[in-house]
Structures are given as structure tokens and as C-alpha cells.
Image (cartoon, rainbow, N blue to C red):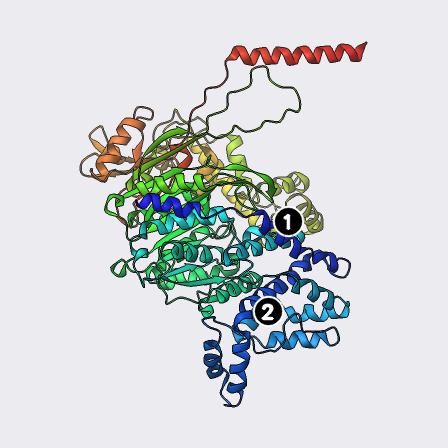
Amino acid sequence: MTLLWKTTINQQYSKMTQNTNNLAAYIWSLADLLRGDFRQSQYGRIILPFTLLRRLEGVLEESKEAVLAEYEKVQKMNLPEEAQDKFLLRATNGLSFYNTSKMDLSKLGEAGIKDNLESYIQGFSKDAREIFEHFKFAEFIGQLNDANLLYKIVQQVRKTDLSPKAISNHDMGKVFEELIRRFAESSNDTAGEHFTPRDIVHLTTSLVFMEDDEALTKPGIIRTIYDPTAGTGGFLSEGMEYVEKLNPQAVMRAYGQELNPESYAICKADMLIKGQEVNNIKLGNTLSNDQLYAEKFDYMLSNPPFGVDWKKIEQDIKDEHTLKGFNGRFGPGLPRVSDGSLLFLLHLISKLRDSKEGGGRIGIILNGSPLFTGGAGSGESEIRRYILEADLLEAIVALPTDMFYNTGIATYVWVLSNKKAAERKGKVQLINGVNLCGKMRKSLGSKRNVMDDSDIATITRCFGNFEVVDARELDKPTEQKSNRGRQSANPKTEAPKTFASKIFNTYEFGYRRISIERPLRESYQFSDERIAELRFAPKPLTEVMKWAYAEYGDHWTDAVDCELYGDLTEHEEGIRNRIKTHYSELKEKQVKDLLDRKTWESQKQILLKAKQLQQAIGTAQHDDMNGYDDMMKATGINLDAKEKKQITDAVSWKNPIAEKVIKKIHKGKAKPVYGLFEVDGKVLEYKADGDLRDNENVALDPSRSVNEINEAYFAKEVLPHVPDAWIDAEKKDDKDQEIGIVGYEIPFNRHFYQYQPPRELVEIDADLDAVSGEIMKLLQEVHS
């Protein structure tokens, strides 16, 4: 019964009708009057507020006389504006705004129209006036009047009937969306930043609300809905309409915040018309200035901008993360600055009503990045870890591509809740709906695909039943391939369009990253070539010193009494010019070090000591670095730490056939898995070779201990290939202090990948032969 009801409700939502499109096109035809006097980018800033004005006027039409009569009475009372508001709002018969002007668009006249229109707008109640202020409407009224266009615009606008009798709130919302889309196109703006396509809004709303149908059928129920990226209020409107259709006696209170002033103005106007408390709609950046910080909500819907950085508010976010921790919004971690999507998700989670008070649910649209970006220990991984370990994630739905006006990338709907049903606890449902769409007759920006009612019903039914669906072939037309160019005689078979759903334990998305080390093996040799490098300081001065030595050092000697060694005073200008053109990365301090005789003398002394060591040790190659220190001490030549390091770096190199370099000899038992090896009765720890270091991701399994899982994986997957390797036991997770760093990712595509075998080689060869034949024929024609 419930699913049937849901399906019936779904079918009541229709796509944008042709009539709505025609109305939006007619309204936009105001641009014909503006052309020449205004830039294209300004059209929307004029057309949108005039449309809003006409809509507000239509909504107020029935209560206009009652408000004017009440206003005459109130004026005589000498009450403050707030007190007047209460009396005047009573006269509106349930509306949350009014207008006390006797004028309307049909009574402005031609003479003095600018002053009359401004007076008319000033007659609106405070919240309604603010809407026009955010459009900077007064400025455009003046410009239109100067261009002798104001009267013409007003006359055309007033002919359009936008009253609730002529067009419903739902359809009016569609008209606003179409106007904003046209505005975005004309101004090279991004339409998707302002509103979300209605099919996606409807799907997300259905997923979030469907689990609460029982509560929403009770009379007098009160619920709150919130969108931190409200745009023009599409999600808020859809949520309210969904609930109203299920339960007309329910009360839905809308809250939102929006960054863009014009989108905010439209959203506020929409909420005003629907009788909402417009003070709950805020203007500003949700992440850096949460103006509803004390509120918790029953339902939250959001489509935050994809891949937008948060550099401008970086310090605010980091301060909240550091100072408030889990008492703030961003305790679990911070994503990279280049993408703030997960910050919005954390913000929404912080707004969930406490589970003891009934809990809350979230529907948020994200791109693919939050699923897998960031390895173990990164901010993104830690956020996913928090969500999954707190058992907040219910489902993720993969949407078709080309669904949004401003991007064609893959997108996903995440559904989260802190009041999971019993069968969902500890589980996550992944639904692959990438093929549930049809082609639009005409693309709108990047939006080429649309989900119809049956597509949305398929997903919501699967989610509602919490069912596993093996890849089921859909009755969808195949992609139309281009017929341009040469067509293959044996084209590749297209993969069938399928729908599928899978259910996983939350821990199945987790892993533990263990570091695998291998021993350092080094050789050393005091050859002339190797110790000659010590004449020059280490990087970044090495190359420029070699050039300077070759250019100016032909008269320098290694004798103690060589007073000119390293003196580059006469050549400073030439050296600096060379550095500018060939070594521009060098900083001034490094340039000064190069020109300083002390640098050259210091390197010379190291070189001379290396030659002394060469005399004592010889020039033979040694493949056991473990005897190096003892041999150096035996020479009796004193070296400080800097000298020893430079000489060692010069004469040694990694050699896979050399002996392992011992780091330390331990007492106690050997633990070869963790790098303690028993050799000739001693327990040895070897130095690790950083170049050979590797990381392995070991799947989480709560039924076994961490060490047991790690060691079993190591024995099976590592030792057979690198028998001298070990697990670095010092790399531990910050939270559980177990070996290995915990990470989480949701490899959605991997779980739904369908293997398509390549074409037979015979078919490929046939195509190649055909192409070769065509090329040879063309060449023959050229030669002839």
C-alpha cells in the first residue's frame, strides 16, 4: 500500500510543461526592449525583479482592499512599524507580506512613473522591500527611466497574469528557473550555481522523505526542512509540496542560506508567497558564517557547488576545526582546499536533529571526488571514516551523466540519517542508476538527459525496499553513434544498459594501510671520480659551482698557500648574470654563499680529508657498508658530522647485491614480520631503503584482531615476492593506535563494473586491412 501511494505521488510530479516554457519565453521577450540600451548581462537583473513584482502583486490582489482599509486605521494609532505589521498582516488573510500603496502596475501612469514605481515598492512590508534591494532594483529603475524604457517595460509586464489563479506556485518556480537559466546564458554565468534541475530535486526529495511517510500522515505534524545552499529555493519548495500532497494538515517550516544575493532574493520571495517565516532564509556564506548555528532540522537537502575551493574562508574553517573540534562542525577533518564539497556534508551532519528527538535525514548531491579522493589519514578519508563508523550513511545513488545545466560529469545522491531502520544498521546501499534517463529533445546548457517519473520510481522503490538487484537490463534505446567517417565492418558491441543495487557492511569500505619496508643495501669506494665531487657544495649549489670552477678556477690549486682559491670578486657581475639566465631558482642567500670564499675553502678542506682517507683505505670497492664506520675510525682522521655526511654521500651508493645495512642490534626475540631478524644468534634491525618502501591496503575485518589480519595478508601477498621485507610497526593509526593507518573509500564504479571482452583479433585485422587498402588506393590516385 505504501509503495503504491509513493508511486502515485511520484506520478503527480510532471516535467516542465510547454505552457510554462512559453510563459518564460514571453517574459524574457522584455529583452527585446532592452537591447541596445543595456548589456546582455544586465537583462536578468531587470527582468527577474519585474517578474517577482508582478507575482507579488498577483498574490496580494485579493487582500489589497482589506489591507488599505486597515492601513488607514493603523496610521491614526501612531504605532511603531513592528506593531503596524501585526495589524496589517491579519488583513492579508494568512499572507506574510503586504503592500500599503494604492498603486499597482496598471496605475503608475506615464508622467512621473519613476517616482510612482519607487513609491509603490516602498509600500511593501520590510521583507518584501529587501528582495528588491538585493537586486539593486532602484538603480535599474533610474537607468530605464533615463532610456525612456520604463513605461514600456511596465506596460508589457502588467499584461502578464502571474496570479496564483493563473499559475501555481510549483509552475511559477519552474518559470523562475527557466528565466535564471536564460539569464545565466546571456551573462556567461553558471546556471547550475543557482538552481538544480527539477528531476534531480524530485528524486532527492523522494529518497529523503519516503522513510517518514507514516509520521507525515498524522494530522498537525510539524517538520523542518533546511538547505544550506538554497539557491532559488527549489529544494525547499519541492520538500514542502511533497509533504503537502501526503498530508495537507502537516506544517513544514523552511530554513535556508544562500550566498548569491539575486538567488537569495528569489528564494525569499518564493518563501514569502508560500507563507513561510522569511527570517529563516539567510544571506551569506554558510561555511564561514552559519547564521542558523543554533538550529537542528528534520530534513536537509543540498546541491553544493562541485569542486569549488574554499581559499577565501580557509582561516575561518581551520580555526573552527582547531579550536572547537567535534564541538564544531568540522571535527572529523578537513578536505583539501581545492574542493569544499565535504565541508557542506559535515555542516549538514552537524545540523541533524538529535536521534532522541526523532533524528533527521540528509540528501546531498556530490560529484565523484568525495567517494575516493584522499588516501588513508587524509582529511577526506577521515571524514568518510567518521560518517561510516558513526553509521550515518544509508545509500548512494549514481545518477546519469549530463543531468546538470553547468556540467556533464558523474554525480551522486548521498542519503544520510541518524535514525536508520533496524535492517539498515551497519549497512550501506549502493544504487547504480546511471542508465535511468532519456535524451531531451533540446539540450539546456550541459543538460542533455532527463529522468522521467518511471526512472525516479525505479530508484525510490529499490531504496524503499532495501533490496539487492543484480544487473537488470533496461528497456532503453542504445546510444546514437555518429555516422561520419568510415564505419567499421565489425563494430564493437555496446554494453547493455542495466540497473543494479548492492548492499555492503559499512566496514567493507575501510582498509588499513601498512608500510612495507625493505633493507638498505649499499656499497662504497674512495675512487678519484667520487671524491672529486666534494669540491662542490651539495644541491642546489653543485651545478653552478662546477660551472664557476671550470670558468674561473683554472689558476686555483689545492695547495695550502693558494691565496686566490675561491676568490670570485672580480667575476661577480658575470656570475650573477649567469645565475639569472640558468639558475634563477637560487635565492639571494645561496648566491652570496656561492660568492663567498669560505664556501669554497670549506669544500676544499673536505676534499683534502677525503683524499687522506683514500690514502688510508684505498680505492677498492666494498660491498658491506657495515664495516664503513670502523674503517673510518681506524684511519685516525677527525671528521665533524657535516664532513662525514658529505664524504659518505659522495663515496657510497645503493647496490642491490651489497650486504644489508644494519641499523641496530636488539636484545630479546626476533620478529621478522616487524623487522627484527635473527642472524648468527643476534637479533638485527636493518636500515630501511626509502626508495623501496611500499604501502599495502589491507581490508578491515572486525571479526579478527588487527595484527592477525595484517600478518596473514603480509604472509600471503608480500613475502612470496619480497622475502626480506617487513611491516613498519611504528606507523600506527592515531585513533586506535593499531599498526597501519585506517582509510575509507567508496569505489562505486569498481563494484558495478561490467567486463566487456575486446573484439576478436580477426575482426580487428579485417578492419586494419580494409583501412590499409583504402589508403593505398588513395596514394595510387595521388601518384597517377
**Mark toward the viewer: 1 or 2:** 2
* Dot 2 amino acid type: Phe
Would residue 495 appear left or right of 564 to someone viewing this image?
left
The answer to whether one can see residue 588 in this image is no
Name the residue carrying label 1: 567
Residue 44: image quadrant is: bottom right
Write the residue at 51% across / 44% down: 605
Secondary structure under tag 2 reads helix
Give the CA separation, mark 1 to mark 2. 75 Å
Secondary structure under tag 1 reads loop
Sequence-wise, which precedes: disc 1 or disc 2? Answer: 2
> Which corner quadrant holds the C terminus?
top right
Closer to us: 460 or 675: 460
Would residue 156 appear left or right of 74 to someone viewing this image?
right
Write the residue at 68% across / 49% down: 576
Q: Position of residue 456 (x, y in %)?
A: 43, 42
Name the residue carrying label 2: 132
Write the residue at 72% across / 58% down: 39
Q: Position of residue 3 (x, y in %)?
A: 33, 43
